[in-house]
Amino acid sequence: MKRNFFYLISILLLCLALTACAPAPTPAAETYEDFVVVGFSQVGAESDWRNANTASMQQALSEENGYRLILDDAQQKQERQITAIRNFIHQGVDYIVLAPTTEKGWDTVLAEAKDAGIPVIIVDRRIEISDDSLFTCWIGSDFLGEGRDAVRWLDAHYAGKPLRIVHLQGNIGSTAQIGRTAGLNEGLTSHPEWELVYRETGDFTQAKGQELVEALLADGMEFDLIFSENDNMAYGAIDALKNAGLTPGKDVTIISFDASRHALELVMSGEISYDVECNPLHGPRVEAIIQRLERGQTPPKLTYVEETAFDTETITQSTLDSRGY
Ligand code: AHR
């Protein structure tokens, strides 16, 4: 009996101790009203650039910063983005952020967002639209400028020399593809000594970049340079070259875009010869735009971010160390 009594007391004490250590009861769940609610329609997760972009948005539009971010990954499909935007409208979000897959085809759904009174911020790539009032503002890269930058480097190193170029394009119809391709086309027009021997889309993915270059090598195609419209396709191309016993940077020159940290390591080691920066860290920029809109101010309609480029001569260890993506 005595033993049972002590047993009972021990259990009681244990329960008391557990109650004391337990986390404080959660207050009633916060409602959407406590946050600025942002629906973000993201292109997908096709590249390191894209993943860095998503992370940047998540960090800037966090609950600690007063936001509730609803992220939708469209897996590189515009139809999915249109559905996501309609869902955001239905949910009554405060802002819609759209990173568009391609430029065309947004008029109807953005008119629906406008009718619902929801500001739409476009980020990264551009949209081609009949009525500019259907979006609040855009922030992103000068993709044509990036293509021209790459051609300036080519011009400095290969003007007057025959050059057989393999061109790996990004997903067709995206501003990143349109601008970078247009830059290269200008270079091809002004350099008849350069020959475009192959052009195909690798959808900005490493797997497709590797697959395309492997197929070319298997066909016995000879080329001097790969103009890859992003780093991930360049990584795939490099793997294909190495598997075929070729040395990237020596047997084949590689030009790429994005300048993510791993690519800059490859610039440092000479495997990529020139990499044009495309900055994905748009989260704080979008957050600043939302803050302006919250204060009733008007952000600039179009904002280009500043970007640079790196080759084996200009890359430094400190650039690599400070690379945020
Ligand atoms: O729109 C930016 C491009 O999209 C980046 O160059 C590429 O890596 C990404 O997928």
Image (cartoon, rainbow, N blue to C red):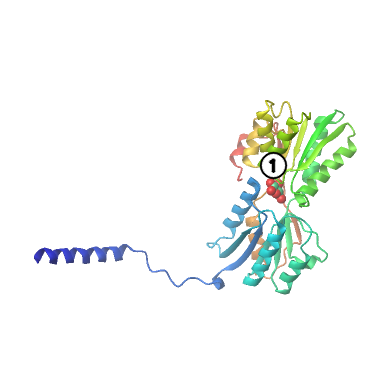
Quadrant where the C terminus is found in the figure: top right
Q: Nearer the viewer, residue 246 or 113?
A: 246
Toward which corner of the image does residue 61 lie, by quadrant? Answer: bottom right
Q: Position of residue 257 (x, y in %)?
A: 72, 42
Toward which corner of the image does residue 242 lie, by quadrant? Answer: top right
Going by the picture, which residue comes out furthest to the front? 219
Q: Position of residue 317 (x, y in %)?
A: 61, 35
Can residue 101 be seen here? The reply is yes
Q: Position of residue 41 (x, y in %)?
A: 66, 60
Q: Nearer the viewer, residue 277 or 207?
A: 207
For this view, does 28 lie left or right of residue 233?
A: left
For this view, does 48 lie left or right of residue 308?
A: left
Question: Around disc 1, counting alpha carbons within 10 Å, would you say few (fewer than 14), some (14 to 19), or many (20 or more)?
Answer: some
Q: Which residue is mark 1?
A: 208
Q: Residue at x 53, y 72 (%)?
A: 31
Query: Considering only vertical position in the picture, is 51 above or below 26?
Result: above
Q: Residue at x 63, y 50 (%)?
A: 45
Q: Nearer the viewer, residue 90 or 217?
A: 217
Question: Which residue type carries mark 1?
Answer: Lys
